[in-house]
Amino acid sequence: MTTGDNVAKHVAMASVATGSGAALGADEVRASAGDGRSAAAARSPAKRDFALAWGLAGAVLCVDLAWFPLSRLRIADPPTFLADLAIILSIVVCYLALFGLHWYLGDDTHRMARVMSRVSERSALVVHGFIFLIVLFGSVVGFTYLAASIGWPLRDAQLALIDRWLGFDWPGFLAFSNSNALWARVLVLAYDSSGPQLILLYLLLGLAGHRARLAELSLLLSLTAVATVLLFLVVPAAGAYAHYAPDARLFNHLDPKAGMWHFDILLGLRNDAAPSFAFEGSQGMVVFPSFHTMLAMLMPYAVRDVRRLFLPVAALNVLVIVSTVPEGGHHLIDVIAGIAITCAAIALVRRYSRI
């Protein structure tokens, strides 16, 4: 439930390292001219996917900007908020500088110029991806804060009822997950890996020059994130821990705040006369559907053609999905909904790509 906030925190730090990290791609400058032609051919669908991804992220941002003045929310610390915006702007300037360098060196045939052009191109691709993640997750987190401030009735009782109808015993699964300290620790680490995984994936795809795959992933993230926040708007929930209120001994091997990191903020948004919003310390509010589950499906899908990466990434993210119940505090139906939405988004993008 905190993936968006984790991603936003890691992105700015990762972008600082991009300029030096992109040098890893310089060796590939020796590739044939055919590689340049194939890359150019891939730009058209990549531009389309990036445009759609940015369109969805921008739409959520516009809703936030229109909704915020009409809501009860207030900026917690305006100077800090402006400083955060300045950091984002500096990353945009970094992207423009890298893109400009690539464009300037585009027709230069000298070997060093070709190396610098390739490095700047791939660095710009990574930084562009980071800017997109900041805007997307900043917008959706802002939307969830606005949605939570409406104070509509929580639906945990109905979600728990669906779980029982499916034959799922949430307290029993929590006790099982906590029965072994090592197993519980593995689940905690797996759950916490989602944000760093996504940052690393954007770095790897960008530095390797996989523009089309990065654009596809960005579009899938936008589709699933928008679906997530819209469902949160109509099906608000506090989470399984808030609903069942298990004894602390039932999760003493898990995080002490498992599934409850957001709870105090959620109550404040629902009940305070003038709740505040700040990037620092913000938490994801979404319970239904599970966005961790969506990320856990999208990350192996993004490396489906890379044999050395697919199996370990898929195995890690199976653990992430399992961890969403005991560590993330999700109902089982949250996970099922996350799987269904991700499958629908992938099918939609694959069908769209053939048009």
Image (cartoon, grey):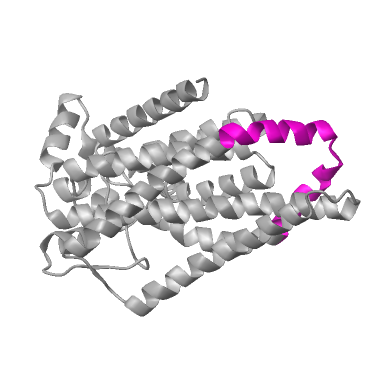
Magenta stretch: helix, strand or loop mostly:
helix
Tell me if residue 156 comes above or below residue 304 in the rendering: below
- The residue depicted at 83 percent of the width and 46 percent of the height is 27
Q: How far from the left and from the top, in percent, is residue 57?
A: 40, 47
Residue at the extreme right of the image, as rendered: 110
Inspect the magenta stretch and tell me whether residue 346 lies in it: no
- The residue depicted at 23 percent of the width and 61 percent of the height is 68
Q: Tell which of 347 and 260 is nearer to you.
A: 347
Q: Is residue 170 left or right of residue 11?
A: left
- The residue depicted at 68 percent of the width and 49 percent of the height is 122
Q: How far from the left and from the top, in percent, is residue 337?
A: 29, 31
Residue at the extreme bottom of the image, as rendered: 79
Residue 279 appears in which quarter of the rendering?
A: bottom left
Q: Is residue 297 left or right of residue 167?
A: right
Residue 330, visible in the rendered structure: no
Q: Tell which of 17 and 166 is nearer to you.
A: 17
Residue 303 appears in which quarter of the rendering?
A: top right
- The residue depicted at 11 percent of the width and 63 percent of the height is 271
Inspect the magenta stretch and tell me whether residue 40 lies in it: yes
Q: Which residues are magenta?
A: 20-46
Q: How far from the left and from the top, in percent, is residue 67?
A: 22, 57
Q: How far from the left and from the top, in percent, is residue 147?
A: 20, 52
Residue 342, visible in the rendered structure: yes
